[in-house]
Image: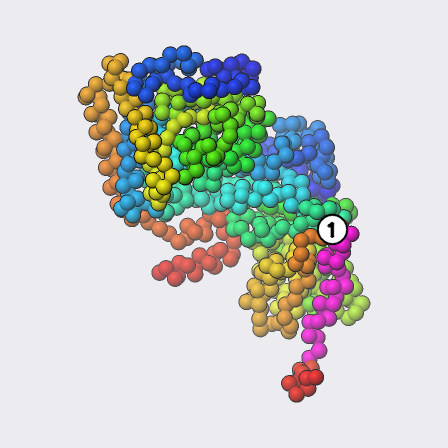
């Protein structure tokens, strides 16, 4: 495939659709004509199962925050189609570059939830080995990870590896200069990278109409000479197919893609935020009616691919996952003051060795 | 010095295929100071290449490349143009090893021509070393001679830590033989450029050359001046500097950057803590003024001159006569 060929209805320089592409409507009925290929039912069932698990994990993390077991937790409730759909589109060799709101994506990738949450628990900035499951550190400064992903992808291409990088970012992050620089570098270098903008309606309290004057965030792609797509971010089938096609396009040397997935953040920004100050309950109810998990449930049930027993088994599995997670989080983490100094440099310089000894002595 | 740096890049590119060199105008042009002259044609566009004009992107992508096993050496065209990359440098480049408990290495070198004295217009003459030196996790180094330029750049590229490699642009045209040797200590240790017994001048970058000129002039006035070229600003080589000051009992820190909250303040504080009983006089600083870098026609007022440093030497309480209160005017 060359760069000028289209994939899934998109090509560099072509405008994305004005309405988000979908395969499954909010009520669970199939949508035709999107140009996206329809995944098999077992693929959708896997998405559903992972989304149920992700939602249960997310709820447990929010509960742990209320119990003081997490310092802070930015929930992605309502965004499970993006979190799971995008990660399921990755191949093992691909890399995920997540942000602080993408804990569900990280857990979906297979990272131990306790390890995934050390940042938000506050015992260490990063708890998992990025190279084990190819998940970059969760990025807190917005959009900076997009540049990392482009460099990573460029290096993969220079080394002749067929690896693509998936960057997750929010609507607010697209306003950052680093997002612009990453889009531009990726397009100029034709780097194998996919930018997934989860447009959840708000950057903390600021709505998208105060964030951008573009028709959609996907429309920004055209200015960079990049393929772009606008998809229904509450339709996991559409997300996984769009992201998967874009990743394959990238791996084959076709260059980057910008995908906007329109979704909604059901919870406040974090447990420390009060969403009632900037949005109405009616708006939340409207989006609850478009729930991504229910949508797949209805879709699969209508097709005879999900019955009561399977649904219960999936729920039970999620429950036991959450229970194990909760139990392990109830044990205080072990802290070692040596960790504060050990990896500042490859070989701790003398002044840090001195400070480490002093802190250890004070703590003893 | 530009030639020595070019040779270091050439040898590093030849020695290690993971090394890539990129930045603005570093390709066919060879960089605005010609430090990368000829590298693109010799090593090809996959090893040495031009980028879009975007410093955060240059450093941010270098971080990603390093995560994926490369050893990027990126060029920022001028000191003040590095500021758009500040977040990438301080929040990510400096911290990723620590954040990942050593799992992610950041063998990235950021070359930055810095400092004044070449008649550059606004934004082309900053000495921004303390912004980086204040950030834990970075190595901040600056060579004072062509020989060190070669050896230190090779060591920087070999270092597993991120290195802010500050090139004193006034020295780009300095000519001196180089030994073309590898020496990891050049990245971690200061060097005594000229031994002396009366006073220690502590300097770095282009000012190390000024300090040597001061030492020659001082000798004619009867002062035996020792000159230390720090080479590494972060981490600081306490041992070499303290040893010298304990011996001479007097110290002056000389740098181009503004004095307030400048590098000299840290050096003076550390020496006061480590050498107080050995000091014969307060530690002085001769620095740039506390002003935005001046326009080129007035930069000589800002830059520490031989005379200003000599003046400081004369103020180091050489007279052992103690002025008693009732003798005071």
Q: Is residue B17 left or right of residue A262?
A: right
Residue that label 1 marks? B295
Q: Which residues are magenta?
A: B297-320
Q: Quadrant of the C terminus of chain A?
A: bottom left
Q: Give coordinates of residue A182: x percent, y percent.
A: 54, 32
View extreme (left): residue: A309
**Coloring basis for residues:** rainbow
Image point (26%, 19%), residue name: A298
Q: Nearer the viewer, residue A319 or B219?
A: A319
Quadrant of the image occupied by residue A80: top left
Badge 1 local density, few (<14 within 10 Å), some, or many (20+)? some
**Magenta residues: mostly which secondary structure?**
helix
View extreme (bottom): residue: B326
Residue A236 falls inside the magenta stretch: no
Q: Is residue A350 above or below residue B48?
A: below
Quadrant of the image occupied by residue A25: top left
Q: Is residue B245 visible?
A: yes
Report in which chain the residue with disc 1 lies. B
Q: Is residue A348 above or below residue B17?
A: below
Image point (57%, 35%), residue name: B57
Image point (39%, 22%), residue name: A232
Q: Secondary structure at mark 1?
A: loop
Q: Give coordinates of residue A119: x percent, y percent.
A: 38, 43
Q: Is residue A187 above or below residue B177?
A: above
Q: Is residue B111 visible?
A: no
Q: Nearer the viewer, residue A159 or B63?
A: B63
View extreme (top): residue: A33
Image point (55%, 48%), residue name: B138
Q: Is residue B117 left or right of residue A59?
A: right
Q: Nearer the viewer, residue B149 or B169?
A: B169
Q: Give coordinates of residue A317: x percent, y percent.
A: 24, 29
Q: Give coordinates of residue B195: x percent, y percent.
A: 70, 63
């Amino acid at each position: 495939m060359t760069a000028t060929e289209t994939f899934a209805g998109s090509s560099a320089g072509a405008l994305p659709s004005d309405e988000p592409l979908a395969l499954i409507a909010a009520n669970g009925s199939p949508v035709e004509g999107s140009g996206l290929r329809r995944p098999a039912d077992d693929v959708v069932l896997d998405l559903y199962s992972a989304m149920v698990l992700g939602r249960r994990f997310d709820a447990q993390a929010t509960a742990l925050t209320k119990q003081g077991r997490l310092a802070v937790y930015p929930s992605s409730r309502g965004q499970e189609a993006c979190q799971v759909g995008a990660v399921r589109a990755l191949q093992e060799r691909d890399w995920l570059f997540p942000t602080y709101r993408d804990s569900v994506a990280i857990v979906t990738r297979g990272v131990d939830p306790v390890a995934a949450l050390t940042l938000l628990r506050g015992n260490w900035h990063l708890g998992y080995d990025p190279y084990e499951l190819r998940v970059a550190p969760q990025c807190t400064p917005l959009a900076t990870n997009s540049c990392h992903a482009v460099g990573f992808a460029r290096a993969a291409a220079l080394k002749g590896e067929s690896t693509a990088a998936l960057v997750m970012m929010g609507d607010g992050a697209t306003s950052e200069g680093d997002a612009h620089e990453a889009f531009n570098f990726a397009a100029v270098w034709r780097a194998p990278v996919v930018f997934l903008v989860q447009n959840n309606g708000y950057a903390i309290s600021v709505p998208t109409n105060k964030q951008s004057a573009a028709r959609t965030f996907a429309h920004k792609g055209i200015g960079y000479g990049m393929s772009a797509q606008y998809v229904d971010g509450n339709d996991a089938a559409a997300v996984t197919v769009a992201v998967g096609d874009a990743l394959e396009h990238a791996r084959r040397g076709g260059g980057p893609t910008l995908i906007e997935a329109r979704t909604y953040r059901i919870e406040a920004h974090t447990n420390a935020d009060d969403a009632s100050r900037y949005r109405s309950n009616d708006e939340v109810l409207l989006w609850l009616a478009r729930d991504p998990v229910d949508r797949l449930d209805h879709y699969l049930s209508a097709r005879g691919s999900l019955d009561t027993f399977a649904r219960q088994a999936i729920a039970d599995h999620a429950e036991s996952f959450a229970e194990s997670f909760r139990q392990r989080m109830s044990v205080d983490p072990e802290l070692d003051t040596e960790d504060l100094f050990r990896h500042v440099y490859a070989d701790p310089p003398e002044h840090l060795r001195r400070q480490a000894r002093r802190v250890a002595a004070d703590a003893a | 010095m530009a030639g020595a740096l070019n040779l270091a890049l050439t040898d590093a590119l030849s020695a290690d295929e993971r090394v890539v060199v990129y930045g603005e105008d570093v390709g066919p042009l060879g960089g605005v100071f010609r430090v990368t002259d000829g590298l693109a044609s010799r090593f090809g566009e996959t090893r040495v290449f031009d980028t879009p004009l975007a410093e955060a992107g240059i450093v941010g992508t270098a971080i990603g490349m390093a995560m994926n096993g490369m050893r990027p050496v990126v060029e920022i065209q001028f000191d003040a143009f590095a500021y758009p990359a500040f977040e990438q440098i301080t929040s990510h480049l400096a911290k990723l090893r620590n954040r990942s408990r050593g799992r992610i290495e950041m063998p990235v070198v950021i070359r930055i021509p810095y400092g004044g004295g070449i008649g550059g217009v606004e934004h082309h003459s900053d000495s921004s070393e303390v912004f980086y030196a204040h950030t834990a996790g970075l190595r901040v180094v600056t060579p004072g001679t062509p020989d060190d330029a070669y050896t230190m750049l090779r060591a920087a590229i070999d270092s597993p830590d991120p290195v802010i490699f500050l090139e004193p642009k006034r020295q780009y045209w300095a000519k001196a033989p180089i030994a073309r040797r590898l020496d990891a200590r050049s990245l971690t240790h200061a060097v005594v450029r000229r031994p002396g017994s009366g006073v220690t001048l502590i300097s770095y970058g282009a000012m190390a050359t000024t300090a040597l000129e001061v030492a020659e002039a001082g000798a004619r006035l009867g002062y035996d001046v020792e000159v230390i070229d720090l080479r590494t600003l972060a981490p600081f080589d306490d041992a070499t500097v303290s040893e010298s000051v304990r011996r001479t009992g007097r110290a002056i820190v000389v740098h181009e950057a503004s004095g307030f909250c400048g590098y000299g303040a840290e050096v003076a504080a550390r020496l006061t803590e480590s050498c107080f009983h050995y000091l014969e006089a307060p530690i002085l600083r001769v620095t740039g003024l506390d002003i935005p870098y001046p326009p080129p026609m007035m930069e000589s007022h800002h830059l520490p001159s031989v005379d200003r440093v000599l003046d400081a030497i004369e103020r180091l309480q050489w007279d052992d006569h103690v002025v008693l209160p009732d003798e005071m005017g």
